[in-house]
Image (cartoon, rainbow, N blue to C red):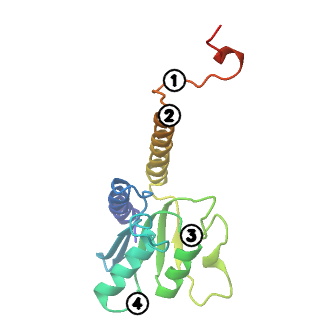
């Protein structure tokens, strides 16, 4: 695939990530492409679906396998907004995906280039090609904005539970004594 197509499909994955974000999920989107056509789409659904395996990549692989009637996705490329974790990398290997293109790296849980390096292990039976960094900044920004918003919402909830308004501060110690 060429760079223009990689960008096009990553933009599609980013649109899917927005669906996840709109549903209160971590904004990760994935699309499976074969012969220039979308054969599978997915976005994160573990929270709303009560399913720890419902990562965007898994959802896209399931959709693709159902659409083509085969769990082997030979010749397919998976585009995902963040580096796949160990579980998703394993599913990609089992599905025989030919190529994986991801946006942002995932320093904590990434299993392609950040940590486990699963696609480079000599003991696996399929070695997908992989490329990271496609629209990396946009992919990373989507996740950062989501968690920034989530932290802000949690802080507001905590403050509301304590009868505080935005900008209010809890005072402790001698200055909190208002009786004197």
- Between residue 154 and residue 5, name the one nearer to us: 154
Q: Looking at the rendering, which quadrant does residue 24 occupy?
A: bottom left
Q: Earlier in the sequence, mark 4 or mark 3?
A: 4
Q: Earlier in the sequence, mark 1 or mark 4?
A: 4
Q: Earlier in the sequence, mark 3 or mark 1?
A: 3
Q: Which residue is mark 4?
A: 71
Distance from label 3 to label 2 (Cα)? 34 Å
Q: Nearer the viewer, mark 1 or mark 4?
A: 1
Q: Is residue 96 above or below residue 9?
A: below
Q: Nearer the viewer, mark 3 or mark 2?
A: 2
Residue 151 in picture, x, y percent from top left: 51, 43
Label for residue 137?
none
Q: Earlier in the sequence, mark 2 or mark 1?
A: 2
Q: Looking at the rendering, which quadrant does residue 60 occupy?
A: bottom left
Please indicate whether residue 16 sits to the left or right of residue 174 in the image. left
Quadrant of the drawing holding the C terminus? top right
User: Which residue corresponds to the image point at 46% horizontal and 40% vertical from the top-left?
Assistant: 157
């Amino acid at each position: 695939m060429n760079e223009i197509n990689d960008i096009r499909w990553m933009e599609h994955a980013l649109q899917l990530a927005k669906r996840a974000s709109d549903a209160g999920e971590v904004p990760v989107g994935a699309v499976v492409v074969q012969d220039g056509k979308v054969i599978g789409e997915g976005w994160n659904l573990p929270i709303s679906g009560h399913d720890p395996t419902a990562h965007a990549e898994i959802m896209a692989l399931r959709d693709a396998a159902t659409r083509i009637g085969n769990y082997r996705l030979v010749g397919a490329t998976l585009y995902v907004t963040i580096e796949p974790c160990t579980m998703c990398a394993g599913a990609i290997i089992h599905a025989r995906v030919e190529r994986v293109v991801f946006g942002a790296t995932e320093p904590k849980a990434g299993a392609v280039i950040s940590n486990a390096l699963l696609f480079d292990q000599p003991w696996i039976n399929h070695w997908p090609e992989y490329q990271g960094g496609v629209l990396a900044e946009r992919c990373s920004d989507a996740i950062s904005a989501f968690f920034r918003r989530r932290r802000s919402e949690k802080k507001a909830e905590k403050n509301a539970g304590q009868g505080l308004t935005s900008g209010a501060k809890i005072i402790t110690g001698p200055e909190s004594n208002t009786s004197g």
